[in-house]
């Protein structure tokens, strides 16, 4: 089994997209269909020097959106020198540097592009995704609505739909999500029957929450504590138990779970009495292929100490017996501060007031507050050998891992390694030694794994983490709290 990204997963809602066979004349349409890998494949067969500026930019942006940001940057740099005031070049730069996690640089290019041409569509798209990542959900929605109203090639396009789904899911309003599914279904009705039916199913599913905001938590007091399942032969320390109608199930606390709640146990799924939506395709770190599941809506999931209400999730049957019954991302909760305590081995849900009261009892220097980035996974700033980057807190992984491109940029020593999975598949990776810091806390390893992470990037932006921090790096030493009110991640230690 891979040691690194055990449950870091992406959910792809574009089930049923048409495939365009043969040579593509209108490569721009592939871009609008969000088929960025096919755009890259098309241009790689061309003479780059003979491409027009729009062609070069489309190639560069699609490289970035397929997590090939360094290649994109290399091609972009001379264009920035030659066209310093061209909004199309500046917007492409915004997308490229966002894919590389250089947020300030990205914002600077996006702002400059929109100063020159306020309505430039690709600059607006880049701004939407940057605002989402900064957890400015209101600003992201406002920018998205500008883009959705334009009368060029954007309305009805797949890239606009996928962007809208990200924006509206972040806003948690089921009425708006339902309407977007329904309107996009009408767009594809004549061209793709299966996709249309899938979107209609999702639209009907989102009728059930009414106007209730999704993914709320209800507790009986200002502070509730749920112990980890110690002594229950759990493969992960950060596992809790859920009991429904006398049946007990294992729940992995997995902050790398994009959807929030993944149910893998069929019996549990039936006990929760879900409303089923459309088919969805999911990528999970332990599996080389994509897995089939179904969108689900659960009115209530009772964790005994707290309840999750109005939950949109996914039922995905276990691909192997080692999977937990549930993957639950507690960082999706927005009306409580969530603390995963790897010292006391417990998860704590508190009101903001109660959390601050408890934190104030810590001596100075025992904790550090960090900006919380990411609308799907919790990212924080990290420094590796004096180079700044982005780390994802991934409690579904194991230990620390680094992205290969990031390590190459630091010219760190790489030791080639090979491992064989149970199915005989060979995985090549590297080891290196590292010293990194998150806020005031340092992590040092003589040996960490280095991976390309080319399967773990956002399908719209191409962004992937530079560093993965798993529970083995936190166990016995750190307490990690997710504060959705101030949009902060707080690392603390009792030592």
Image (spheres, rainbow, N blue to C red):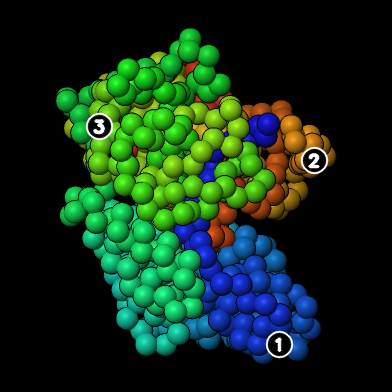
179 relative to 269, above or below: below
Q: Residue at x 71, y 77 (%)?
A: 42
Front residue of this view, candidates 230 and 186 = 186
Disc nearest the viewer among 2 and 1:
2
Numbered marks: total: 3
Q: In the rendered image, which residue does mark 3 sit on?
A: 307
The span from disc 2 to disc 1 (Cα, nearest Å) is 38 Å
Q: Work out whether mark 3 precedes mark 1 in sequence or the reverse, and give the earlier one.
A: 1
Q: In the rendered image, which residue does mark 1 sit on?
A: 51
- Expressed as whole percent of the image width and height from the top left, the position of residue 264 reads 47, 35
Q: Residue at x 30, y 59 (%)?
A: 204
- Expressed as whole percent of the image width and height from the top left, the position of residue 495 reads 44, 17
Q: Residue at x 37, y 53 (%)?
A: 277
Decide: marks 2, 3 in contact (CB < 8 A)? Answer: no
In the rendering, which numbered label is found on residue 99?
A: none
The span from disc 3 to disc 1 (Cα, nearest Å) is 56 Å
- Say whether residue 174 is left or right of residue 161: left
Q: Residues within 10 Å of mark 2 (few under 14, many from 20)?
A: few
In the rendering, which numbered label is found on residue 426?
A: 2
Q: Work out whether mark 2 precedes mark 3 in sequence or the reverse, and give the earlier one.
A: 3
Disc nearest the viewer among 3 and 1:
3
């Amino acid at each position: 089994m891979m040691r690194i990204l055990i449950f870091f997963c992406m959910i792809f809602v574009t089930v049923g997209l048409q495939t365009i066979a043969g040579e593509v004349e209108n490569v721009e349409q592939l871009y609008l269909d969000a088929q960025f890998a096919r755009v890259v494949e098309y241009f790689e067969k061309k003479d780059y020097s003979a491409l027009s500026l729009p062609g070069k930019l489309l190639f560069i942006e699609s490289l970035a959106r397929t997590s090939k940001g360094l290649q994109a940057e290399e091609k972009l740099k001379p264009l920035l020198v030659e066209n310093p005031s061209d909004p199309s070049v500046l917007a492409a730069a915004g997308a490229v540097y966002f894919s590389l996690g250089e947020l300030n640089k990205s914002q600077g290019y996006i702002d400059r592009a929109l100063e020159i041409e306020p309505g430039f569509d690709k600059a607006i798209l880049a701004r939407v995704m940057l605002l989402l990542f900064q957890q400015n959900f209101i600003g992201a929605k406002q920018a998205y609505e500008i883009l959705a109203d334009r009368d060029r090639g954007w309305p009805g396009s797949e890239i606009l739909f996928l962007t809208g789904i990200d924006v509206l899911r972040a806003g948690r309003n089921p009425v708006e999500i339902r309407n977007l599914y329904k309107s996009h279904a009408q767009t594809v009705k004549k061209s793709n029957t299966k996709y249309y039916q899938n979107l209609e199913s999702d639209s009907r599913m989102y009728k059930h929450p009414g106007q209730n905001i999704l993914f709320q938590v209800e507790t009986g007091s200002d502070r509730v504590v749920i112990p980890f399942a110690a002594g229950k032969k759990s493969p992960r320390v950060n596992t809790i138990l859920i009991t429904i109608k006398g049946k007990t199930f294992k729940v992995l606390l997995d902050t790398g779970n994009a959807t929030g709640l993944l149910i893998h146990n069929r019996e549990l799924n039936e006990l929760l009495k879900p409303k089923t939506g459309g088919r969805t395709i999911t990528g999970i770190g332990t599996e080389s292929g994509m897995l089939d599941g179904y969108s689900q809506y659960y009115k209530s999931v009772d964790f005994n100490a707290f309840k999750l209400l109005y939950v949109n999730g996914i039922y995905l049957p276990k691909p192997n017996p080692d999977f937990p019954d549930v993957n639950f991302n507690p960082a999706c909760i927005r009306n409580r501060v969530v603390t995963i305590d790897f010292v006391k081995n417990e998860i704590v849900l508190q009101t903001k007031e109660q959390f601050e009261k408890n934190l104030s009892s810590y001596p100075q220097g025992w904790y550090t507050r960090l900006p919380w980035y990411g609308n799907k996974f919790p990212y924080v700033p990290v420094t590796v050998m004096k180079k700044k980057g982005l780390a994802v807190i991934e409690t579904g992984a194991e230990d620390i891992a680094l992205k290969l491109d990031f390590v190459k940029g630091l010219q760190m020593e790489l030791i080639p390694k090979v491992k064989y999975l149970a199915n005989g598949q060979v995985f090549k990776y590297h080891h290196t030694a590292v010293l990194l810091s998150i806020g005031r806390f340092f992590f040092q390893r003589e040996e960490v794994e280095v991976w390309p992470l080319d399967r773990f990037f956002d399908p719209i932006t191409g962004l992937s983490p530079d560093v993965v921090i798993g529970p083995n790096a936190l166990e016995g030493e750190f307490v990690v709290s997710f504060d959705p009110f101030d949009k902060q991640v707080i690392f603390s230690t009792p030592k």
